[in-house]
């Protein structure tokens, strides 16, 4: 299946670079048009009905995120191409919307387009963009987690710890809830605020506010508010102690 794609980017050099990379390395994508602003891109989308948008964020007048003002229920996928602020990138990762950082890495471009092809149903698109918008609104204080029934909104301050379960993550909250999500622990390591959350080992991220005690003489020396005993990796000890003292 070949996807129809358009590029929306205000910089001519960037347009040319993106198009050259796609045409050279992604033969299953056909670039049908290029636009130099969001408004011009809206017209092209309505005319061409593409499957995929390669969309810059930082543009004059209207940035790329404002595309949702024109297409609240998009029938196309989007790969954001950006050097945008970290909180937005965190939201993209959480909602499984693909993004690329400039300058574009060829392998990352190929992987993003591969994902776009695998996620082509309208239901999937609608769900992912709903999560994206929720996380853009809530990223400072809440976490929007996809579930089988829909979405679960967690107050970040209520998360005691997050535990790896293979390719899943298990959240433990102060309310005693256990919530499993089909995302890796690495995903949430990059999303949760580093001022509060700490990756202690390959299996755990903990909320520093819910540490009950730390015994440096024990291998499993961190005791959490929910009674969990957490091991601190040797390579993490210095960083952990700096955070605790600081």
Image (cartoon, rainbow, N blue to C red):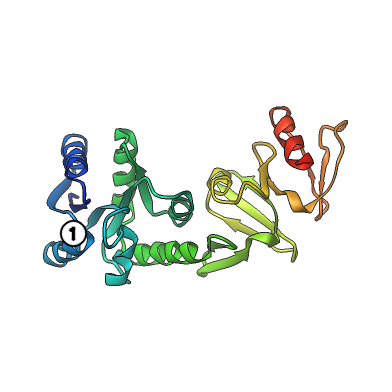
Residue 92 appears left or right of 67: right
Mark 1: give few (<14), some (14-19) or many (20+) Cα within 10 Å: many
Residue at (68% x, 60% y) in the render: 157
Residue that badge 1 annotates: 50
Secondary structure type for disc 1:
loop
> Is residue 217 depicted above or below 128 in this figure?
above
Residue at the top extreme, as displayed: 235
* Count of numbered marks: 1
> Is residue 59 depicted above or below 20 in this figure?
below
Q: Residue 231 falls in which quadrant of the image?
A: top right
> Is residue 67 depicted above or below 29 in this figure?
below
Q: Please indicate, yes or no, whether residue 110 appears anywhere in the rendered image.
A: yes
Residue at (64% x, 60% y) in the render: 156
Horizontal and vertical percent position of residue 54:
25, 51
Horizontal and vertical percent position of residue 96:
42, 54
Q: Residue 16 falls in which quadrant of the image?
A: top left
Q: Quadrant of the C terminus?
A: top right
Q: Residue 221 falls in which quadrant of the image?
A: top right
Residue 58 appears left or right of 29: right
Horizontal and vertical percent position of residue 228:
80, 49
> Is residue 160 depicted above or below 106 in this figure?
below
Residue 138 appears left or right of 88: right
Q: Please indicate, yes or no, whether residue 204 appears anywhere in the rendered image.
A: no
Residue at the front extreme, as displayed: 61
Residue at (81% x, 37% y) in the render: 220
Horizontal and vertical percent position of residue 111:
33, 41
Residue 134 appears left or right of 159: left
Most foreground residue, 121 or 9: 9
Most foreground residue, 175 or 245: 245
């Amino acid at each position: 299946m070949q996807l129809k794609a358009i590029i929306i980017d205000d910089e001519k050099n960037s347009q040319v670079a993106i198009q050259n990379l796609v045409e050279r390395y992604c033969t299953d994508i056909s670039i049908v048009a290029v636009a130099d602003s969001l408004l011009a891109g809206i017209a092209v989308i309505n005319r061409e009905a593409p499957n995929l948008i390669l969309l810059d964020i930082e543009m004059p007048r209207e940035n790329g995120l404002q595309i949702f003002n024109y297409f609240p229920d998009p029938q196309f996928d989007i790969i954001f191409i950006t050097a945008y602020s970290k909180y937005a990138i965190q939201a993209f990762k959480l909602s499984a919307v693909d993004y690329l950082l400039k300058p574009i890495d060829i392998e990352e471009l190929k992987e993003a387009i591969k994902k776009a092809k695998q996620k082509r149903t309208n239901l999937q698109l609608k769900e992912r963009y709903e999560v994206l918008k929720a996380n853009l609104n809530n990223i400072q204080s809440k976490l929007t987690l996809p579930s089988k029934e829909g979405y679960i909104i967690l107050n970040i301050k209520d998360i005691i710890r997050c535990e790896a379960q293979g390719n899943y993550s298990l959240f433990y909250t102060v309310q005693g809830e256990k919530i499993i999500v089909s995302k890796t622990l690495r995903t949430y390591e990059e999303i949760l605020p580093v001022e509060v959350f700490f990756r202690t080992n390959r299996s755990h991220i903990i909320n520093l506010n819910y540490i009950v005690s730390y015994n440096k003489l024990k291998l499993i020396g961190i005791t959490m508010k929910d009674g969990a005993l957490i091991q601190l990796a040797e390579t993490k000890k210095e960083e952990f102690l700096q955070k605790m003292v600081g």
